[in-house]
Image (cartoon, helix red, strand yellow):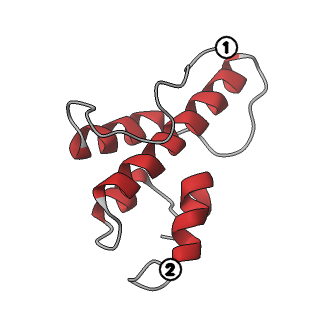
């Protein structure tokens, strides 16, 4: 995990909501973090999913570079937290393809 203390600071939560990989190394760290609410965890993972899908599209179009998208791990983490996809998040039903 990129954050050092067990407690996550407000600014780290804000950062994770816009760029999850700036705060967490793996989606499972989000699931296991005890200082985040269920809604925060799902919102962070949904952002991570959107970012991973964008990276996957870029890779499919031969514009790869950077970290692997971890899409399978993100989806597995979301499934653990919200198996029926019932928790609302700020992204709504954002399109996953262009």
Which quarter of the rendering shows the C terminus? Answer: top right
> Percent from the top left, x then y, of residue 23?
56, 65
Report the Cα–Cα distance between label 1 and label 2: 35 Å
Q: Nearer the viewer, residue 23 or 15?
A: 15
> Percent from the top left, x then y, of residue 31?
31, 57
Q: Total number of numbered labels?
A: 2
Label 1 element class:
loop
First in sequence, mark 1 or 2: give its number: 2
Q: Relative to 75, is 44 above or below?
A: below
Estimate how packed mark 1 is, as few (under 14), some (14 to 19) or many (20 or more) residues with alpha carbons within 10 Å.
few
Q: Residue 54 vs residue 63: left or right?
A: left
> Percent from the top left, x then y, of residue 3?
52, 76
Q: Relative to 7, is 40 above or below?
A: above
> Percent from the top left, x then y, of residue 51?
60, 38
Residue wearing tag 1 = 98
Query: Which dot marks residue 9?
Result: 2
Task: Return the residue found at the far right.
Answer: 63
Residue 19 falls in image quadrant: bottom right
Task: Return the residue found at the far top.
Answer: 98
Label 2 element class:
loop
Q: Residue 5 vs residue 86: left or right?
A: right
Asked if residue 2 can be seen in this view, the reply is: no
Q: Residue drawn at (50%, 37%), measured in percent from left and top?
A: 49
Q: Residue drawn at (71%, 44%), measured in percent from left and top?
A: 66
Q: Residue drawn at (59%, 74%), measured in percent from left and top?
A: 11
Asked if residue 91 can be seen in this view, the reply is: yes
Q: Residue drawn at (24%, 46%), measured in percent from left and top?
A: 81
Residue 6 falls in image quadrant: bottom left
């Amino acid at each position: 995990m990129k954050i050092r203390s067990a407690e996550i600071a407000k600014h780290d939560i804000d950062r994770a909501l816009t760029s999850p990989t700036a705060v967490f190394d793996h989606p499972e760290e989000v699931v296991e973090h005890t200082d985040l609410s269920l809604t925060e965890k799902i919102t962070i993972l949904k952002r991570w999913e959107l970012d991973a899908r964008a990276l996957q599209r870029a890779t499919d179009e031969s514009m790869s570079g950077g970290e692997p998208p971890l899409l399978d791990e993100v989806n597995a983490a979301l499934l653990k937290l919200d198996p029926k996809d019932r928790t609302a998040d700020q992204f709504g039903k954002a399109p996953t393809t262009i």
